[in-house]
Structure formats: C-alpha cells, structure tokens
Amino acid sequence: MTDSQGLLQHVFNGLTAFAQQHLAEHRQRQERLAALHDAIEQAVDASEPRIRLVGNYAEKLVDAVETALNYSGQVLQQLPPAVLLDAHAWSQDPQVNAFFATVDDLRTLLSEDPAIRTFFVDPGHTECFALMLMVKRETETFGSVLRGDVLVRDVRCIQVSFSQQRLFFPAVSEARLREELKQRMLVFLATRALERINELRTRRSALEEQRRQLQAQLRAFRGHVQGLQPLLSTDDADERRVVALEQRLLQTEEDLVAARNPLNTLDDYLEQIRQVLGQPERYLQVHPLALRLTRLGIKLSPDSPEPGETLALIEFDSMGEQRIGALVRFEKGELPSVMTTASL
C-alpha cells in the first residue's frame, strides 16, 4: 500500500468512526425522547401548550425535563417510609402523637377527606398510602425544665404544634405513591413556569397601559400649550410638567422593550419553561428537619437531659411557603363511616 493509499484509508476510517459516533448519539437521543415523551407532553400541557408549534420542541425540552425528574427522584429519596396512622400509633409513636393533638383529630382527618372516602369506595382498596402536608408552628410559652437534678418552673420554652393537615394523592402502595409524586412534582414545576410567564405578561400589559396614559397626558398638555393656556398662566409649570411626562414616557418605553424581550416569540415561551424545569431547586426546596420534643410538644435542644423523642421530618419550601411533609398509610377500618356507606 502506497503512502497516498494509507492516507486515504486513514481519512476514510476517521470519517466512518465519526459517522458511527454521530449515529449512536442520534439513536441515544431518540431513545431518551421516547422514554421521556409522556413527561415532556405533561410538562407542556401544564405550562404553555402553544409551544408545540415550535419545531423540535420536545428535543429542546428533553434535557430540562430530565433534570426536573432527576431532582424529583432525589427529593423522594429523602422522604422516610410511610408512617402508620391509627389509634394505636397515636398512643405509641411519638411522631404521630406530635402530628395530632388528639386521636379524634387523626380520625377526623381520615374520615372527612373526600378523596380518601372516594378511594375506599372501591372494595379492593383496604389500605391507603398518601402524602400528608401540614403547617408547623412554634409558640413561646412557659413551663418546667430539668436542669441537672433540679426541676425549674416558669422557664421560657418553645411549644411546637402541627395544624392544617391535608392528605394528597391516595394510592394503593407506597411505590405507586412515590411514582405519582414524581410526576406531580414535574407538573408543579411546569405550573411555576406558567406563573412566571403570566407574571411577565402582566408586567408587559401594565407597562403598555402606563405608556398609553402618559401619551394621552402629553397630548393634553401640548394642546394646552398650543391653545390659550399660556395666556392664563404666569409660570412655566405646564412646561415642566411636559418635560417630566416625556422623561417618564421614555423610561416606560425602555422598560416595555425589556419586558417584551422574554416573550417575543413562542421560542421565548419555551425558553422560560426550559429555565424553570432546568433549575428545579430554585422553585422547590426540600430540607431534612430534626426536632427533639417532649410528649407535650416542648422543643428540646439535642443535648437536653429532658426525656424526649427526635422526629425526623421533611420541610418543603416553595416560593416562600413552607410545609412539613410525610408519607402516611392507614387501613380502611380506621374509617367506619366509609365502610357503612360502601355497604349500602
């Protein structure tokens, strides 16, 4: 083989390897698109369906959707196994006891939730798994604490209580519940993208209205200047007002250009959605929360000699709103009214 033939063979081999690599990458991306197809369409439905008019919208969203799903999976890994809710657990499990002031409060939550009642109408559903969200409150109070061997009274303490308990997404198993939550988190993030788009639209509309009002005021004052107003005025107040209005109008027009840029085209809408899904930690944060409490809900320091239990909780934080979350499970027998209704 001559040197020229060897060079040609080397070039040919290089081109072949490049083509094979490109084909493999294309195939891999198509497989990702197929695997994430339902999730992408779910995110589009929850945000801005019109972006389907954008060419290759699914390919442009696939990385962001995958990022959002991976983040949701990491969040779910932090959730402990489902906690059993029943009368016995309320008396024996410190966590359940902390969640509900009385066992009647627990039973009221289970029996009066419409989604749970509907879930148990199916005779095949004997146990329910759900996400419970609630609000944690810390209130200053006075109580007795043990310092060494001495019981000290009227000491300032922090009372921890939970309220506004609500159950979400009833499922037949914990695995089904976790999968449902993963999809729900994606929809939640897509909805945040829609809210962001609506905020941009609202700001743009407000600036457009402000510009119209300023233009109308300027026309009115300029009309005065061209009419008899100068004969009736002894100073240049109107002229100064015109200058001030012109400056405000100029600033408003600059702000309006900036407000229009993020939503000029459907590609811009898609980019807003991609940014939110690609940065899920900015819109939904999850923090492990350890609380050491007495049986009466008094908050203890980790090294306190007072008898207490440490609760391992999860706190959800989204756009300044916090909720305590826990996976829970309970049996149909805890809802006697549902059984009676079903038997009828």
Image (cartoon, rainbow, N blue to C red):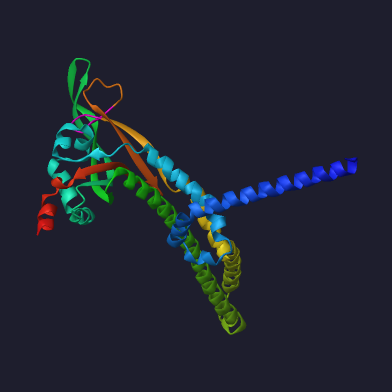
Residue closest to the eye, 91 or 77: 77
Query: Taking 278 as reference, is 239 left or right?
Result: right
Q: Could you tell me what secondary structure mostly forms the magenta stretch?
A: loop
Q: Quadrant of the C terminus?
A: bottom left
Q: Image quarter for residue 232? A: bottom right
Q: What stretch is highlighted in magenta?
A: 293-300
Outermost residue toward the front? 1
Residue 259 can be seen in this image: no
Q: Which residue is drawn at 90% across and 41% down?
A: 2
Residue 5 in the image: above or below residue 223: above
The image shows residue 220 at horizontal and vertical percentages of: 55, 79
Residue closest to the eye, 174 or 261: 174
Q: Does the magenta stretch include residue 245?
A: no
The image shows residue 57 at horizontal and vertical percentages of: 55, 60
Q: Image quarter for residue 195? A: bottom left
Q: Residue at x 47, y 65 (%)?
A: 49
Query: Taking 84 as reference, is 257 left or right?
Result: right
Residue 285 can be seen in this image: yes
Q: Which residue is drawn at 20% across and 41% down?
A: 85
Q: In which quarter of the image is the N terminus?
A: top right
Residue closest to the eye, 181 or 145: 181
Q: Image quarter for residue 96? A: top left
Outermost residue toward the top? 149
Q: How many marks?
A: 0
Residue closest to the eye, 118 or 239: 118
The image shows residue 301 at horizontal and vertical percentages of: 29, 26
Residue 222 in the image: above or below residue 44: below
The image shows residue 171 at horizontal and vertical percentages of: 28, 49
